[in-house]
Amino acid sequence: MKSNSYRFGQFYFKAYCKTVGQGWEVSVHWDKKCIFIGNFIHKAEATAWWNILNKEIKNFTRTYWISSRSAKTWYGHFFSNHLYKTYYSFLDKVFVKYNRTFKSAFSKDVRRYNYLKRNMDRGERFFLTRAA
C-alpha cells in the first residue's frame, strides 16, 4: 500500500493506492470523506494513474488555491470533479490501447480462419441450435 498525506492550509487530505481483492484501488480522502476512488485490474495501470494523480494534486492546488474563509465542502466537490475528469481521460487513453490490441488480434484471427476455411468441407458445417 502506498499513501501520501497533504496539508493544504488548514485542510488535510490523503491519497491511497492499495490492493483490493484481485485488483488495485486508488483513492483520495478529504476531511475523512472519500472524494475520489478508481479501480484497476492491472498493477501497471494503477501505478501509472497513481503517478498522474500525485502530479494532478500538486498542479490543482497550485492553480486553484484556497483561503481559510473558503467553503471546505464546495472545494472538495470541485477537486473531486477535477480528479474524475482527469481519471476518465486517462482511462480513454488506456482503453484505446486495448481496443487497438483486440482489434488487431481479431483481424489476425479472421485471416487465419479464412485460410483454414479453404480446407474445410462445407458438408460438415455446424449450425447454432438452441439447447434443451
Image (spheres, rainbow, N blue to C red):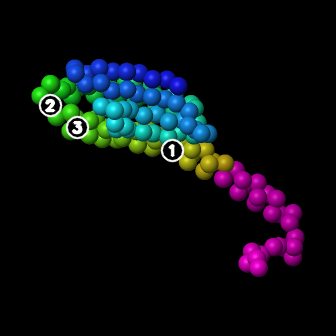
Q: Who comes first in sequence, dot 3 or dot 1?
A: 3
Q: Which corner quadrant of the image does residue 13 belong to?
A: top left
The disc labelled 1 sits on which kind of residue?
Answer: Val
Task: State the residue position of label 3.
Answer: 73
> Could you tell me how far apart the alpha carbons at marks 2 and 1 are, in whole angstroms?
39 Å
The residue segment tinted magenta is 106-132
Which residue is drawn at the image coordinates 34% and 32% (left, top)? 32
Q: Residues within 10 Å of mark 3 (few under 14, many from 20)?
A: few
Q: Is residue 116 left or right of residue 27?
A: right
The disc labelled 2 sits on which kind of residue?
Answer: Ser
Q: Who comes first in sequence, dot 2 or dot 1?
A: 2
> Could you tell me how far apart the alpha carbons at marks 3 and 2 are, in whole angstroms?
9 Å
Residue 127 part of the magenta-drawn span: yes
Q: Is residue 125 left or right of residue 25?
A: right
Residue at the extreme front: 32
Above-or-below relation of 88 to 6:
below
Q: Observer-nearest residue: 54 or 12?
A: 12
Residue 37 visible here: yes
Q: Is residue 79 left or right of residue 89?
A: left
* Res 96 label: 1
> Could you tell me how far apart the alpha carbons at marks 3 and 1 are, in whole angstroms?
35 Å
The disc labelled 3 sits on which kind of residue?
Answer: Thr
Q: Which corner quadrant of the image does residue 30 belong to?
A: top left
Task: State the residue position of label 2.
Answer: 70
Helix, strand or loop under label 1 = helix
Above-or-below relation of 92 to 49:
below
Which residue is drawn at the image coordinates 21% and 38% (left, top)? 74
Residue 3 part of the magenta-drawn span: no
Q: Are marks 3 and 2 in contact (CB under 8 Å)?
A: no
Which residue is drawn at the image coordinates 66% and 53% (left, top)? 106
Q: Residues within 10 Å of mark 1 (few under 14, many from 20)?
A: few
Q: Are marks 2 and 1 in contact (CB under 8 Å)?
A: no
